[in-house]
Amino acid sequence: MPRQPRVTHWQYFTLISGVLIANGIMSMPRAVAADAGRSAWLVILLVGCIVAVLTWLAHLVASHFPTRDAAEWPKTLLGPILGRIWMLAYLMRAIIFLLLTAQLYAGYLSVRLFPRTPTHVFALLVLALSLLAVLAKVRGFARFSEVAFYMSIPLILFIIIPFTKGNTLHLLPLVGDTPPSDLLKSALAASYSYAGFDFLWFVYPHLRRKASAGTVAFGAVLLTAIVYAFVTATTIMYFGLEKLGLIFLPTLAALRGIEMVLFERIDSLMMFAWLSTVVITAAAQLYTATRLVQGLANGLSFPKVAAGLSGLFFIVAYSVTDLPLYQTIAISDIFGIFDLSFFVTSIFVFLILALVRNRKGDKCDEPAD
């Protein structure tokens, strides 16, 4: 599939960070602190560093296929049958991830601002905006990610205010007050918030300059980890562990304490600013699913497949409107563990296979028969 490279390093950076940062910025502090206690921010930072290394390894896989994405080269490495089986599993994962992203944001928005509005209304909004972003192709999608990145900056700037009002004693002791088993459990709980770094496998062929792209992707994940850790430390300092455990969306609750002349409810404003990053995450999965369908059945039109998948998602989102938010969160925790396991295994298998092909003198970037 010929491509004209159009994505800059900066757009690549905003895409990778944008895909990640929507997943846990609002609720992850409470979920991780429930097991890790005061060490939650350290656990989140450590998990982020591990995922950053995995992202760099995923980049190494992509670097063997400079003109093809993950809807094409798995058939070269695994063969036409196993490659399609892996792609089918990847497709199911992308579908679940997309629906979870839309449903979680819809649930948060309904609980926080619009309790009388059905959640499927907001889920459909996310899906519709995601379809528009995907139909703009990678170039338009990358530009949208830049805008979303700039829109998310105020959220981090505003969180500095409650950080300065918090009590540092709530973070002491930093380590030693939580059993290792609970720390591991909290690390698994944080894994969902880092899901989505694999989208680089679909963006890499579109990069204008592929040199140093691994460093860019690594830095994007590391920035996300730092932001997550900072927000978690802020909410622990601001509320303390006991109160934090009772607050469903601690990041928004911390923002409620900010008094501004122009905006009476800065937390409500941030919910809509957050929508831009949610769309990036959801659209990345819709793009992934669309390309995988094309890879499984050659000759399909990209816009038609994207629109068809969106129609299917609309139906599913409407049918799960009565699913309680706590059940959606429980599903996302399980999904995060599966997602991390799936891609850790895939990355190492693909790296080994790519190295073996190179040693044999086979060109990895040649399409499979």
Image (cartoon, helix red, strand yellow):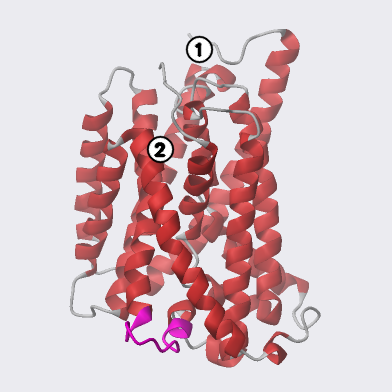
* Badge number at residue 230: none
Task: Residue 292: say if magenta.
Answer: no
Q: Is residue 69 visible?
A: yes
Seen from this angle, which residue lies furthest front? Answer: 261
Residue identifier under label 2: 288
Relative height, residue 173 to residue 297 (above, below): below
Q: Which residues are magenta?
A: 253-266
- Residue in front for this viewpoint, 107 or 167: 167
Examine the rendered structure and indicate whether residue 274 appears above or below residue 76: below
Residue 133, position in %: x, y? 30, 44
| Label 1: element kind | loop
Q: Give the residue number, with chain letter if any, for mark 1.
A: 368
- Binning the other alpha carbons within 10 Å of mark 1 as few (below 14), some (14 to 19) or many (20 upward) gives some
- Amino acid type shown at disc 1: Ala
Tell me the chief SS of the magenta region.
Answer: loop
Q: Amino acid at mark 2?
A: Thr
Q: Secondary structure at mark 2?
A: helix
Q: In the drawing, does residue 213 fall left or right of residue 155?
A: right
Quarter where residue 320 is shown: bottom left
Q: Where residue 353 sits in the image (x, y, percent)?
A: 67, 23
